[in-house]
Image (spheres, rainbow, N blue to C red):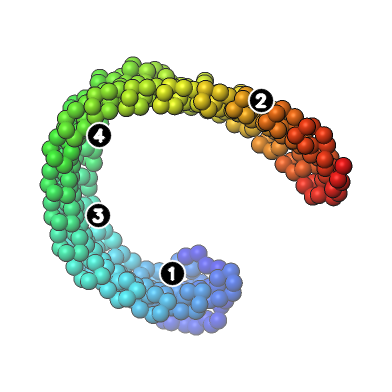
Amino acid sequence: MKTGFLVTVLVYSWGLMAQTPIITYYDDGNIKEKYHILDNDSSRVDGLYEMYSHNGNVIVKGHYENGKRQGEFINLYEDGSIQRTTHYDDGQKQGLTRVFDPEGHLIQEAIFSDDTLTGELISYHPDGSIKAQTKFNNGKPEGWVISYYRNDIKKEETYYKDGKPNGPSREYYENGNLKLEAELVNGLLDGQYKTYFPGGQLEMEAVNRRGSRTGSVKYYYENGQLRSRGVYENGGLEGVYEVFYDDGSPKATIPYKDGSRAGKSTEFFQDGKIKSTGVYSNYGMDADLKEYNEKGHLILEKSIRNELPHGKWKTYDDKENLVLVEPYESGKLHGVRLQYENKKLIKEETYAFGIKSGKSVEYFPNSEPEVVSNWKLNWLQGEYIRYHKNGNKEYEGSYHRNKRNGVWTYYDKKGEPEIREIYEHGELKEKIEL
């Protein structure tokens, strides 16, 4: 047995053997254990054994005989209430073990034979009703493993053989209706697999072979209408996967190859008009996508490469007028981002791999510049100019790390300077009327 700092208090004879009291300590100096050893052999603990919490309360107590646990061992909570009782014979668990919660409710009991779980292990809800039952044979589950809701209704049941799930497995809703049923072989799903809605209607049906889905799979709405269907081969979807609205009208057709999207997918509005299209390749990681509104007008074009945004993403209004162009590279904005309103450019911003950098211009409806700014690492940096609608400057100055810095000059609509301000790190130091 490993110990911390040891204190030898007394050595005395007990028959032909000397017994030495041992005390071990936590790092903070509080007592951790008290026990005796025989003939100064730390492996031969003998007599009363006690373990203490950091607060000084006994949390484990029992007896050893010549290095082996013997009789009842009790684990305790800080308040002294029993957490666990375990019986030992010659160092091995034998008979009934019980576990209690802090309120004193029995929450588990099990039977051991020669340190091995044998017979039934039962867990309980705090109200005393059974929570779970498992039968063991030579330390392995055998037969039905069953769990229950608090109202004694089954929650789940699985049949075990040779220590592994072998046979039927079922889950239930709290109303008693079947939630899931499956077949397992050596712990792997093998055979029919079905799930159900709380009202009892079939939700999904599929087939598994040695842990992999294979063959037809179907999903349903609660009204019984088919929701989607497809075919699995070697654990992956193969061929066209079809999706339907709850009235039976087509919602989407998605072709798969070797478990990944491949070819042209189409999504539909409920009236049959196209909602989106996508052409997939590279195991579904590359795609060119288009989205439409209910009037059939294009509203978005985008591309994906290696599952990341790529190229120019274009957004359109309800009349297919361009409203936004966003250039992407490796999943991040990179290049000039353009924003339009009523077919006119109203803003252009420059990005470098997701970071706003370089020149940015905002425009009046007449396409003349309204604001010209410069950016670095998402901060305003350098020259900044705002214009009147007539094209003359309204004010100008400089930023340093997103704060006004240096001389800022304000102009009237005729372009004549009116006010000059001097800033230092964003703080106004001087204001001059011109």
Query: Mark 4 or 2, which is nearer the eye?
Result: 2
Q: Earlier in the sequence, mark 2 or mark 1?
A: 1
Q: Earlier in the sequence, mark 2 or mark 3?
A: 3
> Disc 1 to disc 4, how far (Cα)?
50 Å
Estimate the x, y position of residue 215 in percent, counting from the top left. Answer: 19, 26
Query: Mark 2 or 3, which is nearer the eye?
Result: 2
Query: Which residue is rendered at x = 25% and y = 70% of the image?
Result: 126
Quickly name the residue at label 1: 44
Q: Can residue 20 be seen in this view?
A: no
Residue 91: image quadrant is bottom left
Query: Which residue is rendered at x = 43% and y = 69% of the image?
Result: 44
Q: What residue type is labelled 4?
A: Gly
114 lies above or below 17: above
Q: How crowded is mark 2: few (under 14 residues within 10 Å), some or many (20 or more)?
A: some
Residue 209: image quadrant is top left
Disc 2, SS? loop
Q: Nearer the viewer, residue 245 or 21?
A: 245
Quickly name the residue at label 4: 211
For residue 368, the mark is: 2
Disc 4, SS? loop
Q: Residues within 10 Å of mark 1 (few under 14, many from 20)?
A: some
Q: Which of marks 4 and 2 is nearer the N terminus?
A: 4
Quickly name the residue at label 3: 139
Query: Which residue is rendered at x = 24% and y = 24% of the image?
Result: 272
Q: Residues within 10 Å of mark 3 (few under 14, many from 20)?
A: some
282 lies above or below 37: above
